[in-house]
Amino acid sequence: MSDKTVRTNSEVVLIGAGIMSATLGLILKELQPDIKIEIYERLDIAAAESSDAWNNAGTGHSAFCELNYTPESEDGIINPKKAISIAESFEVSRQFWAYLVQENKVPSPENFIKSIPHLSFVWGEKNVAYLKTRFEALHSNPLFKDMIFSTDFAELKKWMPLVMEGRKESDKVAATSMAIGTDVNFGELTRSIFGYLTKLEGVTIHFNHEVQKLKQRDDKSWRIKITDVATGQTKKAYTKFVFIGAGGGSLPLLEKANVPEGKGYGGFPVSGQWLKCINPEVIAKHQAKVYGKASVGAPPMSVPHIDSRMINGEKALLFGPFAGFSTRFLKNGSYSDLPLSIKTDNIIPMVAAGIKNIPLTRYLIQQVRQSPKDRINALKEYVPSAKSKDWVLERAGQRVQVIKKDEKEGGILEFGTEVITTADGTLSVLLGASPGASTAVSIMVDLIGRCFKDQFETPEWQEKLKTMIPSFGQNLNDNPDLLTKVRQETATVLKLNN
């Protein structure tokens, strides 16, 4: 009986058809046009999980308004380091997207990016003082020089009429505004990139294909066993380099790869829901992304915001997300994902992280038990005039927060993005959630620098990277003139307010 297994050979295999794989695939193809790339996605379309607009907790994360990126120490000092790093990375993404538009590699920028003010809004004396301190810590940095702080009721009403409607002028409130904020539809952008990429010679995308096994061979190459979900056919892909960018599905695949660098990692899944406005008059009143302070113990993806977005060509208004707990690692995953991810090498970090994050557990239990009235009451803190008949509950995406070994703590819960790369550079895995998509270009350039080290340092690759990202190799926050130039150029190409 003959073996009907289909076998393919390539230099690169990308697992998961989200923004990370799209970005990595395109950058590699630009750097080495003859590179052969295979992409495997378990669903029937690209960007259907974390990159999709409805599933993405924040679109256009640039640290302009997300308060969780500027933690406050016990003595009241604000650390702006993470916010500066994210803002810097977002400028890198903007440059790359502008390059794609200029070179006609993706359609019109209006399809995926629009200007929208980014606001932080707080109430109460303590929070107003915090926001003022945060403003002072950020405003001195060139990346945030356009930020405005105000406690003036009339000015805040102009910035966000819907949020201020029904409040008393005597209320202690404050906000910061960055007019150069953006709304990015990463689902549209991802599908546009794959649309271009898969027309190129040597690039193939396989939908409805689920990776079952990964094994490194003696020559350091990888053998990947894949099932065609539609036909049941088995396939084997042989490749020199594997990138796993499968969102919540990355952890189980990392475990299957069985590499020493992957030992001790676990995952904590957090689900989400939105309140979606269905009243066009209310939707029309709000034109901003307004972020507030998260509840104690809340994961970063659950920072509350009242958010204007463009989804499928229409203006949408969302509030949330409300966090929840599910044992699934993907929105389209299985309830057995979490139990099956627990192994002998990660059980201690997972238990240790669980014990140290009791406030998070308590917070998630409270969120799961919320009634429709509780959710509307939470909304009314941001939109005092909100009526329940104008809002419906919509299921958001699934995130898996990273748990990793820690010598002191036993295990810690990470709320960022974690890239794990093997010592030989043949496998790289992206775990975690926020800020993710907005910083994809910086993350992937860094990954290429580690996994394709020799080629990365060649004059040809360095020159091409500077063409795609004019500020490549320089720090924009330390170079205000270059920052101004780059912002103006990308704003023109992407049709944004500068």
Image (cartoon, helix red, strand yellow):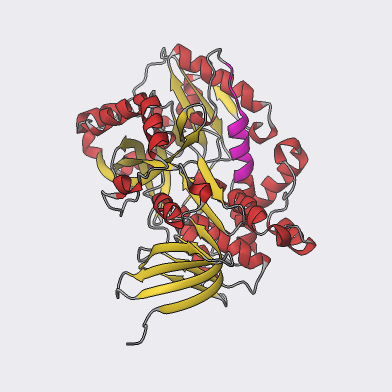
In this rendering, would 468 be left or right of 440?
A: right
In this rendering, would 465 be left or right of 37?
A: right
Q: Residue furthest bottom?
A: 1
- Find residue 303 and report its image quarter: top left
Vertical order, 116 against 140 (above or below): below
Q: From this viewpoint, is residue 328 visible?
A: no
In this rendering, would 22 be left or right of 464?
A: left
Q: Main secondary structure of the magenta part?
A: helix
Q: From this viewpoint, is residue 74 visible?
A: yes
Location of residue 141 in the rendering, given as x and y in whole percent from the top left corner: 68, 30
**Residue found at x 22% / y 34%:** 388
Vertical order, 424 against 219 (above or below): above
Location of residue 460 in the rendering, given as x and y in whole percent from the top left corner: 77, 64
Q: Quadrant of the C terminus?
A: top right
**Residue found at x 60% / y 30%:** 147
Location of residue 281 in the rendering, given as x and y in whole percent from the top left corner: 32, 41
Range of the magenta residues?
77-90
- Residue 323 part of the magenta segment: no
**Residue found at x 63% / y 23%:** 137
